[in-house]
């Protein structure tokens, strides 16, 4: 897999400022029509980079542990992630930034 190194990202999540070095993995896009470009799996989270440049951060707290685990599986498989987010997750993300 190709890693895309993104240096320091400053983002505001509630009242807490986060500085995080993100190690993104390219999304395989086996279906050929995904809006997902890359992802990063955390212990209890998933960060998704969409082709339009928006990052979405999904956590157990915001999305649910079962849903985040399903997102992780779809990300690794390289198929169905964008569709699952649009159909099931919708706006249940912790944070988004560009």
Image: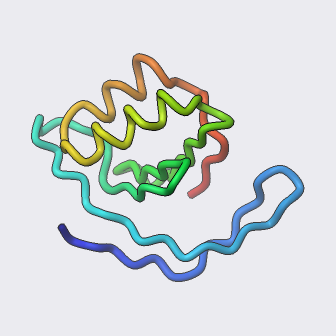
Residue shown at the point (35%, 25%) measured from the top left: 84
Residue shown at the point (53%, 48%) measured from the top left: 45
Question: In the rendered view of the protein, which quadrant contains the C terminus?
Answer: bottom right
Q: Tell me how many marks there are.
A: 0
**Where is residue 69 shown, x and y percent of the image?**
42, 37
Residue shown at the point (76%, 54%) measured from the top left: 13
Q: Name the colour scheme.
A: rainbow
Quadrant hosting residue 39: bottom left
**Where is residue 65 shown, x and y percent of the image?**
54, 33
With 4 as the anchor, is 54 left or right in this view?
right
Front residue (pair 72, 12): 72
With 92 as the anchor, is 31 left or right in this view?
left
**Where is residue 68 shown, x and y percent of the image?**
48, 36
Q: Which residue is the extreme one toward the right?
A: 15
Residue shown at the point (68%, 74%) measured from the top left: 19
- Residue 42 lies, with reference to residue 50, above or below; the image says below
- Residue 11 lies, with reference to residue 62, above or below; the image says below
With 68 as the anchor, is 37 left or right in this view?
left
With 45 as the anchor, is 70 left or right in this view?
left
Q: Which residue is the extreme one toward the top?
A: 87
Quadrant hosting residue 23: bottom left
Front residue (pair 63, 9): 63
Question: In the rendered view of the protein, which quadrant contains the N terminus?
Answer: bottom left
């Amino acid at each position: 897999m190709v890693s895309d190194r993104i240096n320091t990202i400053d983002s505001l999540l509630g009242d807490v400022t986060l500085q995080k070095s993100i190690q993104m993995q390219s999304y395989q896009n086996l279906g050929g029509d995904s809006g997902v470009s890359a992802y990063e799996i955390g212990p209890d989270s998933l960060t998704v980079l969409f082709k339009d440049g928006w990052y979405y951060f999904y956590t157990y707290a915001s999305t649910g542990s079962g849903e985040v685990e399903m997102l992780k599986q779809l990300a690794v498989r390289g198929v169905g992630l964008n569709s699952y987010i649009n159909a099931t997750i919708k706006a249940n993300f912790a944070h988004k930034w560009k």
